[in-house]
Amino acid sequence: MKEPANQQTVLLTGATSQLGVFLIPRLLTEGFRVLALSRKASGRPPDPGASLGWIHPDTLDMGADNSSSTISRGVDILVSCGPVELAVKAVKVCSDLERVVIFSTSSVFSKAGSADPVENDQIADILGGEAELSACCGEAGLALLYLRPTLIYGCGLDRNISRLAAWIRRHGWLPLAGQATGLRQPVHADDLAEVAVRALLADPPLTLDSPACGGSTISYQHMAELIFDSLNKPRRIIGVPPGVLTALTGLVAKLPAFHGLNREMVRRQNTDLVFDDSPLREALDYNPRPFQPASEDYEIPSCAMNYRLPD
């Protein structure tokens, strides 16, 4: 583990997310000190000599009154994997910040004009928060990098690839909308962690708003086939007329077991959701792995369990 002469402190929001799972070990390996935000953390100040400290998000409110030197001073970098409103608050509170890396979502492109009102409201909230964040960073003269991942997978905490895997495990088959020809670029969470760390080490700091895609561009159906393969299951895919599957989804989405599912998700199975992240790849030598999932991609790796807070 490296330890720079002038060790920098990273404030990490969304630290228990799938991105945090891989970011914390990578940040520590590069010699950064990490202050990880989690609602599971106690309200006690972290050990100032520890490389990893867990703090509660309420600490940001304390820092706004300058009553918490842990937050208001001494934080050099913000890496946000959580809600954008937390990032806005952190930028306002942390007076020593030098650069900001924000993990947002490519959904601001793919869900623009969605027929689902909930999705529309979610995207409007994200864009509104990002506009405020950009203004705050501009006023403070902070380098701001937006990373907008496509379908994230890698440790079983996502609601896309892992949800498909869970269905396949349980039922042994998978219904798709017709041929499900829409193209996808699934990206491993560890590749995203790697590119974020590269951005933190870049000099001068990178200022960019970019998608962050995986190494494969494949159809939704082929993506599903590879998930079957990763589980050592025969490929049993049933093509259902898109209108029929959309209507059925509208019905089952009302059940608690299918919370978060909606008709638009089914409709998009035949829509290409492909983005160009070549500026990011060139700037940071980003070379993500192709989509070849394995069974270990559906659980938190043992090397990361040492950095998890107990449930």
Image: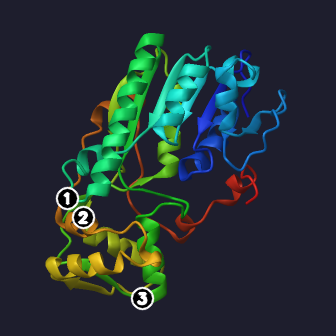
Please name the residue that numbered disc 2 is placed on: 264
The answer to whether one can see residue 5 in this image is: yes
SS at mark 2 in the image:
helix
Q: Do the residues bearing badges 3 and 2 touch, measured as CB atoms within 8 Å? A: no
Rounded to the nearest whole Å, what is the CA distance between mark 1 and mark 3? Answer: 31 Å
Where residue 172 is drawn, which disc sits there? 3
Rounded to the nearest whole Å, what is the CA distance between mark 3 and mark 2? Answer: 24 Å
Residue 98 horizontal side relative to residue 84, left or right: right
Point 45% across, 63% down: residue: 159
Image depth: mark 3 or mark 2 in front: 2
SS at mark 1 in the image:
loop
Point 22% across, 63% down: residue: 268
User: Who comes first in sequence, dot 2 or dot 1?
Assistant: 1
Please name the amino acid that badge 1 sits on: Ala
Disc 1 crowd rating (10 Å Cα; few below 14, some 14-19, many 20+) is few
Where residue 115 is drawn, which disc sits there? 1
Q: Nearer the viewer, residue 236 or 44?
A: 44
